[in-house]
Image: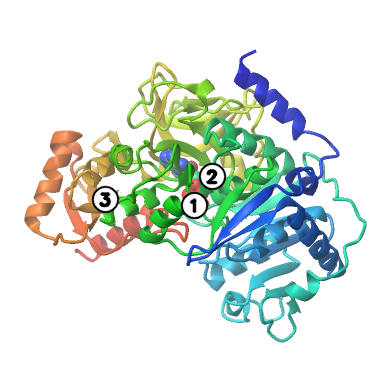
Amino acid sequence: MSHSAQRVAELQAEYGSPDLAVAHLLCDRHPADAVAATLVDPDLETVDLTYGELRERSERLAAGLATLGVGPGSRVAALLPKTVELPVTLLAIWRLGAVYVPLFTAFAPQAIALRLLASGASVVIADAGQRPKLDPGEDMPSDPPWTIVTVGEPAAGDVRFDDLAATPASDAVPVAVGADGPMVQLYTSGTTGRPKGVVVPARALASMVAYQEFGLDVSPDDVFWNGADPGWAYGLYYALIAPLATGRCTVLLNAGFSARLTWDVLANLGVTNVASAPTVYRALRSSGIAAPAGLALRRCSSAGEPLNPDIVTWAQDALGVPVRDHYGQTELGMVVINGWHPDLEAPIRPGSMGRPMPGFTIGVLAEDSDEPAAPGSLGRVAVNIADSPLMWFSGYDGDPATSAEKFTADGRWYLTGDAGQVDDDGYLFFSSRDDDVIIMAGYRIGPFDIESVLSAHPAVAETAVVGVPDAARGEVVEAFVVLRAGFEPADALAVELATLVKTRYAAHAYPRRVHFTDELPKTPSGKIQRFVLRAQRREELGRGI
Ligand code: ATP
Ligand code: MG
């Protein structure tokens, strides 16, 4: 057995027990004086939260939540910034065997209501600054079935968080939900349409810890910062849950994104291991602010969207270390990695999102059968369930029809909904989401390849490529381009960009039109929503524009 297969088996055993108690694994078993989180405010002031403090505070909050009727299986949502109340709340919820429902602080009331109603939340813990979003309104029910707990000054009828958190702790031990018991209920990003509900069982901890080791290679000495917001899967699984499971320290920055602040956090805290979405690396690059001297980075990872190869090159210069791409989903956690772990050491192939993470077997299925496609041909990226001991997803919450679409008829494969290809050595290449594939005169074109060529142009800050209907060819390629500061939209630039694609990628796949725009439609987590651009162009074309 290889070392990595052995490690997968160990993790399965560690997180597979029928009497698993989440709060024990994520807090109580760790040394009380070890630091669980370094909380950073926008002025770069830091406060450490130890595992001992986390235990004590969450025991009291759990006793308080129990007085509100929270118990095993209850859904408890939180609309909290990255302050100390966030980890304390999570641990209190898990202590009671309840299920955590994350709400991203950038959400508008509609997105919040959707999640609260769909999950059946009985309690919402909200920061006073966020609290107005829960007021009755167009999207929010006037007589909601949930109790609101407010951090800060409560509104009439709310429970004050500090009162609840001052409840004397009971002598109750953490509730054992078991490996199949639910610990989180969250929603996909909504990049392709309505977000889908995913209930995460406690045994998923094994795959989260596996990625922290194999993918990110977080070592005990690292200063680890995953900048992704814990309102989403990547931030929740790998900025909070996996570090807590392993007794590590995580950095939580309570501020919106700014390039200056990102550089300052990296430099001032001496961050050695960083992870984030590609949009952050793109923004750092186009900010024009030079990297501060003395960065201590040894590991740099990206996930959530395709990583354009020019960012990898840029990072090597600017950060002193390349960014490695990792691929995953809310439904799976990370499953394809350019792993940093020394055991997985293999040359990186430009443009590849890596190879299957130990614990998962990933295939590319042919378009017309549920069998693996030949290497080099485009197909559907899928997970072989029987050969993936760390796989935990079995279907969406309350949506059997959408769930059924995600599995092949024989139940052998889970379909990610992404298109890609594999080479002879097992390196996987992301092409696009199934929905975003452009089919022009019979050719299948992945927008990402074209976007990567365009984003290497010095004038381009960000770009999205979509297929729009065309009478002769079925679809043609169009590009939406956000320019970097100092560049102006111009016909000559549009021609230059189209020519770049012709010469660098393929003569037929160049954008027939380049639309210069101030911003691209994105999910609250920053993913580009190409379906919005497609709909916009269809409507305009219908009006003859
Ligand atoms: P929805 O399913 O609601 O449309 P979503 O798929 O964006 O939203 P997530 O689960 O957050 O929701 O994202 C997973 C998807 O993100 C993957 O299926 C893939 O399309 C994309 N993705 C993640 N990592 C990468 C990567 N490294 N390269 C390319 N695409 C990636
Ligand atoms: Mg998805």
Q: In this picture, is 417 found above or below 49?
A: above
Name the one closer to the observer, 293 or 541.
Answer: 293
Name the one closer to the observer, 390 or 469.
Answer: 390
Q: Report x, y in % for residue 22.
A: 77, 46
Q: Which mark is residue 269?
A: 1
Indicate yes or no: mark 3 CB to ligand 1 under 8 Å: no
- Visible in this render: residue 397? no
Element type at mark 3:
strand
Tell me the colour scheme of the image: rainbow
The answer to whether residue 110 is left or right of residue 29 is: left
Which residue corresponds to mark 3?
A: 469
Location of the C terminus (image quadrant): bottom left
Q: Report x, y in % for residue 518.
A: 26, 64
The three-letter code of the residue at mark 1 reads Leu
Crowd band around label 2 with a 10 angstrom C-alpha radius: few (<14), some (14–19), many (20+):
many
Please count the marks in the image. Answer: 3
Location of the N terminus (image quadrant): top right
Disc 2/disc 1 C-alpha distance (Å): 8 Å
The answer to the question of whether label 1 and label 3 lie on touching residues, with beta carbons closer than 8 A, is no
Give the mark nearer the N terminus: 1 vs 3.
Answer: 1
The three-letter code of the residue at mark 2 reads Val
Q: Report x, y in % for residue 18.
A: 84, 37
Q: Which mark is residue 223?
A: 2
Furthest-right residue in view?
171
The answer to the question of whether label 2 and label 1 lie on touching residues, with beta carbons closer than 8 A, is yes
Disc 1/disc 3 C-alpha distance (Å): 50 Å
Residue pictured at 13% horizontal, 52% vertical:
494
Give the mark nearer the N terminus: 2 vs 1.
Answer: 2
